[in-house]
Image (cartoon, coloured by chain):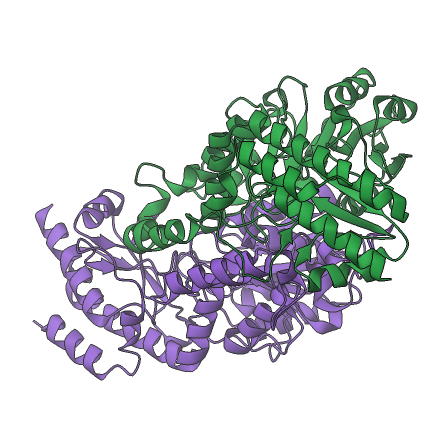
Chain colours: A green, B purple
Amino acid sequence: MTDFAATAADLDAADPLGHWPGRFVPAGDDLVAYLDGNSLGRPPRDLPAALDAFVRGPWADRLIRGWSEGDEPWMDWPLLVGDELAAAALGAAAGQTIIADSTSVLIYKLARAALSLSGPERDEIVLDAHNFPTDRYLLEGIAAETGRVLRWIETDPELGVTPELVAEVVGERTALVLASHVAYRSGYLAEAAAITAVAHDAGAPVLWDCSHSVGSVPIMLDAWEVDFAVGCGYKYLNGGPGAPAFGYVAARHHDHARQPLQGWMGHAEPFVMGPGYRPAAGIRGFVTGTPPILAMVPLRLGIGDVAEAGIEAVRTKSLALTDFALSMIDELLVPRGVRLGSPRDHDHRGGHLTISRTGFEELTPRLWARGVIPDFRRPDGIRLGLSPLTTRFAEVARAIEVVVEELDRV
Amino acid sequence: MTDFAATAADLDAADPLGHWPGRFVPAGDDLVAYLDGNSLGRPPRDLPAALDAFVRGPWADRLIRGWSEGDEPWMDWPLLVGDELAAAALGAAAGQTIIADSTSVLIYKLARAALSLSGPERDEIVLDAHNFPTDRYLLEGIAAETGRVLRWIETDPELGVTPELVAEVVGERTALVLASHVAYRSGYLAEAAAITAVAHDAGAPVLWDCSHSVGSVPIMLDAWEVDFAVGCGYKYLNGGPGAPAFGYVAARHHDHARQPLQGWMGHAEPFVMGPGYRPAAGIRGFVTGTPPILAMVPLRLGIGDVAEAGIEAVRTKSLALTDFALSMIDELLVPRGVRLGSPRDHDHRGGHLTISRTGFEELTPRLWARGVIPDFRRPDGIRLGLSPLTTRFAEVARAIEVVVEELDRV
C-alpha cells in the first residue's frame, strides 16, 4: 500500500507555492483538513491589519472625502478592483470588469443586459440543467417576466456543458446561453472558447458563471470572445463570507446592452442629480448602488495574492492537488464502493473533485466532527475542494485517510 | 452678539449623549468639524477589534461551518440583524426586515414586489419629483420595463411630500407611491402615517425610503401600516462606506408580493438545490444572493449603538443640534444672504439642515480645506448633517463660525 502521508510530505516540501498556506490566518487546532476553500476561502494573515488600517485611515480620517480624494478615491473602486481582478485572473483588458453586488444580483443584471441585445423573436434562454441553483432560479424568473422560455442543456451531472450539447439546443430562437465555466458539483471544466463560438454561430451571446473557476483556473475572457461573465469573491479569491462579486461585460456591448437596475452609481453624472437616467459610458453603466467599499478590502488582498502567486502557478498546484487526491481515491476509496463524480482528464478538471457513495450524507457530519471539512451535495456527493493557495498535500492525505477510517467503521 | 462657542460648551457639558462622540475612532487633527455623518457615518472605536475578532474567530476558525453552526449561524444574519435594526430603529415586529444588497438594489426589488400586488389597470407610479436621484432613476427604469408611467408629486424642493400633495395625484390608476421619509436635500420630515393612509385610501401600497431617517428619527413602520421600506446602512447607522442596506416588507404582503431577483438564498430550501424556484416563506423570500456577512459586522455595531443610546434620546439630541445650528444661522448667516432651505418646525425637521446662497459651490472646497466638512448639493445648497451620536455642539459652533469667516473674506 502506498504511503500517501510520506508522498504528501514530499509534495509539500517540493511545492513552489508551499509557503502560501502559512500566509493565511491559522484555524484552531481542531481543524485537521479544510477542503472547502472552493466554497469559502480562508482569511489572509494580513487582513486584520488591512482592515484596521482602512477603518482608522481612509474611513475614520478621510470620511466622506474618501469618495473623491486620496490616491484611490472610493468612487473608482468598482472599476479599479475590477481591473485588478481582470489582470490577475480573468484575461480581460481594463475597463470591462466591476466589483459590485452579489453574484446572484449580477447574474440578474447581466442576463437582463444580454437579453436587451435581441428582439422578441429570440425567445429561448439556454442553460445547463445541472447548473448551480441560483443561476437556474434567476433565469427561470427572467424568462417568466420577459416572455421567454428556458431551453435546457441536458448535461451529464457528473460531467458538464460541452460544445456538442450546446450546439444541439441553440439556434435562431436563442437569446442567451448561460453556463458555468467549472460545474459546481462535478468540477467539469467547460471548453469556454468553443462553447462561446457555438453560441455566436447561432447569433446568441453567452454569460459565463465563473464562480468555481475564478482564482483557480486561468480564464481568458477577451481571447475567448466572451460576452458577459460573473463570479464569486468568497471562494478561491478569499474575500470573506458574502464578499461582493465581479461582473464582466465585453467592451463591444457597452453601448448597446442595458441592465434594468439603473441606480445613481451607474449614471453618467451621479452628483449632478438631475432628472432622467443616463447610463455612464463603459462598464460603469452596469453599476447600480453605492459600491461596497469596506467589503472590497479583503477581496483586494485576495486578488493581490492571486496576482502575486500567478494564476498559471495556481493552476499547476491545483492539478497536482487533484492528481494526488485522485491517486488516493483510486487506491483507497474506489475499492470501498466510492465513485468518482468528476472528470479525470486535466483538460476538463476544475479545482475540486466530487466523490459519491450511498451514506455520504450521514458520513459528512462525522468527518466534520473529526475536523475534516469538505461539503456535501445531494444526493450522495462529497466535494473535495482543493484551494491551491491554502491547501497542503498533507491535508488531502489526512482527509482521505479519515474518510477511509470512517467508511471502515460502518 | 451671542457667544455661541460658550453656549455650545454648555450644551455639550449637559448633553446626556455627550460621551458618545468619544466612542468613535477619532479623525486626524486637521478635522475641525464633521457635518456629513448623514452621508457617511464614523467608525465605532470598537470596530477594529470587532473586525479582528470576526476574521480570526468565526471566519478563520469556523470557516464554512460558520453558515450553519455557532450561536448565530450566518444563514440567519440577514433576518437576525434585520430584526435588531427593526427593534432599535424601525418600530417593526420581528420577521419583516432583512439586511441585504445596496439601497438601490433593494429599492428595485421592493418596488417590483409592490407592483406585483396590482394588475395592469394600475399603471401609474407616483413619486416625489425631488426625491433622491437613485429612487427616481430606478423607478423610471421600472416604469419603462413594466409598461407604466411616472406620475410626479410636485413638491417644493425646500420642503417635501405632504399628504395633500400626494392626495392630488393618487387614484385608481396608482400602482405604487414611493417617497423619502426625510428628504435628502431639505431634510423635510414627511408625515409617513398620513401619507401611507392617503395611498391606502386610493388602494395603493407605499415604499418609504428611510435612508435619511433611519438611526436619526424614530420610525414606526408597523404602526404607520407601511407596506415596504428601505434605508441606508452607512449614514446614521455608521456601517461604513457601501454598507449593506435594509429592506422591510410588511408581513401581510409576504405571501403575495413577489420580487424578480429570485436567487438561491431566497429559496424555501436553498441547500436542496432542486429544480424550480420556490420562495421561502416570510421575509426570507426577499433575499437574493449570499448575504454580505463581513460587511454586516460594522453595521451590527452601529445598530447596537442606536439601541443602546435609544432612538428617542437620539432624536432629542438631533433636534437640539439643529435648534442650535438654526440659532446661529439666523443670527450670523441670514444677515449675510444665506437662506434656510429646510423646515423650521420640529414636526417636519429631519436630522440635517440645508443652507443656500450663491457661491456655495465655490465655498465648499474652502470649508473642506479648513477641516470643516459638510457636503454640497446643487444648485447652491450646503448640507449640515448633524449625526446625534457623533456630532458635538462645539463642532456646529466652529463650523458655522468658519462659514462666517469665509463669507466675510469674499
User: Number of callouts in the render?
Assistant: 0
Residue A382 in sight in this render: yes
| Location of residue A222 with respect to A296 vertically, above or below | above
| Location of residue A388 with respect to A243 vertically, above or below | above
Q: Nearer the viewer, residue A387 or B259?
A: A387
| Location of residue A93 with respect to A50 vertically, above or below | above
Residue B160 in sight in this render: no
Q: Is residue B403 left or right of residue B136?
A: left
Q: Identify the residue at horizontal 83%, vertical 18% (top origin).
A: A202
Q: Nearer the viewer, residue B41 or B204?
A: B41
Q: To which quarter of the image does residue A259 belong?
A: top right
What is the quadrant of the C terminus of chain A in the image? bottom right
Q: Is residue A226 left or right of residue B242?
A: right
Q: Is residue B115 left or right of residue B198?
A: right
User: Residue B274 appears at what percent x and percent y?
Assistant: 86, 52
User: Residue B273 appears at what percent x and percent y?
Assistant: 82, 52
User: Residue B164 appears at what percent x and percent y?
Assistant: 55, 68
The residue lying furthest to the front in this view is A1
Q: Identify the residue at horizontal 60%, vertical 24% (top origin).
A: A255
Q: Identify the residue at horizontal 80%, vertical 64% (top origin).
A: B256
User: Residue B366 appears at what percent x and percent y?
Assistant: 19, 46
Q: Nearer the viewer, residue A304 or A64?
A: A304
What is the quadrant of the N terminus of chain A in the image? top right
Q: Is residue A82 left or right of residue B142?
A: left
Q: Identify the residue at horizontal 45%, vertical 63% (top origin).
A: B53
